Amino acid sequence: MLTLQQIRQNPDAVKAGLLKKYFGQPELVDVIIGLDDQRKKLQLESDNLQAKINSASKEIGLLMGKGQKEEAEQKKQEVASFKAALQPLAEQLASREQELHQELVRLPNLPAAEVPVGKAAADNVVIREGGNKPSLTADAVPHWDLIKKYQLVDFETGAKITGSGFPLYKGKGAKLQRALIQYFLDFNTAAGYTEYLPPLLVNEASAYGTGQLPDKEGQMYHMPLDNLYLIPTSEVPVTNIYRDEIVPFASLPIRMTAFSACFRREAGSFGADVRGLNRVHQFDKVEIVQIVEPEKSYAVLEEMVAHVEQLLQSLELPYRILRLCGGDMSFASALTYDFEVYSAAQQKWLEVSSVSNFESFQANRLKLRFKDEKGKTQLAHTLNGSSLALPRIMASLLENNQQADGIVLPACLHTYMGTNKIS
């Protein structure tokens, strides 16, 4: 959430940032400033009235001490009239504060200066590429055919059990999922991240804290009876570990990694883009999250990008890194790098990771603060990244490494799988 200080200090810059993100209601900035002006006026009136009540109450005590009961009774009536006037004023103030908050949470984070101008994915900027695209034989097939051939995932039974977009992994497919998860977690913990295994359901406060609510309410699975939400990523519960906390400076940076199933309603319905593992409602993902002091967050962002890049290099997959344009960024992000791997059989790039700096946007919603070296309390910066999302990694591993006699696995997975090939 943007702070009122940010908005009031330079409203024109805030409007420009909102337009760069293609947010359609920059006039909300003026609405928010107007509501804040009303709030301040009501607060001043309330404070003045409370001051009169306090002053008159002191006078009553003095008058009673002097035996001037009649004058004291008059003052009591005066206090009663002040209190009667204060009640509706307090109600107006509470109402205005609620209106102000409701409008504030509708504003997305502002894009960093480095964010390219653009409206959609076609406007994203490729920063660099790595790895080598494989040359497949003429009879190479996409991963959904390989999955059937080697009996790795049963989409039909998954659809019977739950519905379309809920794959059922089995045999070597299940083992490959488990191997990838364990390898990713080991890779992250070796880099200094502490492992967590979080709940798969979060309450409304948690979903609000990381920016999923109210922005992505329709994309999350909601349990109305308990008012709980299935997580779209472990970023949500893991970051919320520090909601309403003041973190000691000595504990920064905080590095966390977590594996979880992820649930998203917007999986699409038809076409090659949503076939097989390209887009599903439930998938596994390993996440990395950092909480840092503001001055270091962009250096940490580059560190996290390098970490994910090394992980992809170890999987021997061709990849590219993109800096997302304003119109293609998430609601909460200030700067995002996407990682895509090349799917040789589909001849297309598939997104497998987003690494983002949220600056203080999430921290302000979470009330996640830290005490600096001088003892001053301020908002922390939060960052997160996929490390990695499994479905498209699995799709690319199958497609890019297919041979006549099986799927050759990268060396980093041999120990985890107990073999160098799926056949």
Image (spheres, helix red, strand yellow):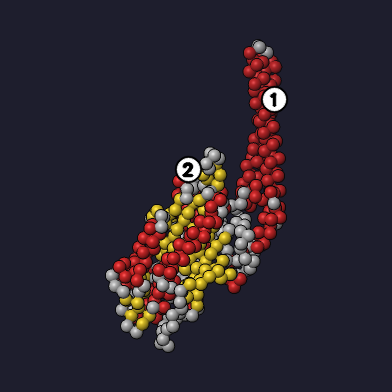
For image coordinates 41% across by 65% down, the residue present is 284
Q: Position of residue 388 (x, y in %)?
A: 43, 65
Q: Nearer the viewer, residue 393 or 102?
A: 393
129 shown above or below 205: below
Instruction: Please state which amino acid type lies under the numbered disc 2.
Output: Pro
Which residue lies at the image location 53% right of the left edge and 54% below the top edge? 297
Instruction: Provide the secondary structure element on which disc 1 rests.
Output: helix
2 is higher (above) or lower (below) than 412: above
Mark 1 or 2: in front is 2
| 3D distance between C-alphas at marks 1 and 2 | 48 Å
Quadrant showing the C terminus: bottom left
**Which amino acid, by three-letter code, is at mark 1?**
Glu
Question: Can you tell which quarter of the image residue 19 is in?
Answer: bottom right
Query: Furthest-bottom residue in view?
Result: 138
Q: Which residue is mark 2?
A: 248
Disc 1: which residue: 78
Residue 178: x, y in percent? 34, 66
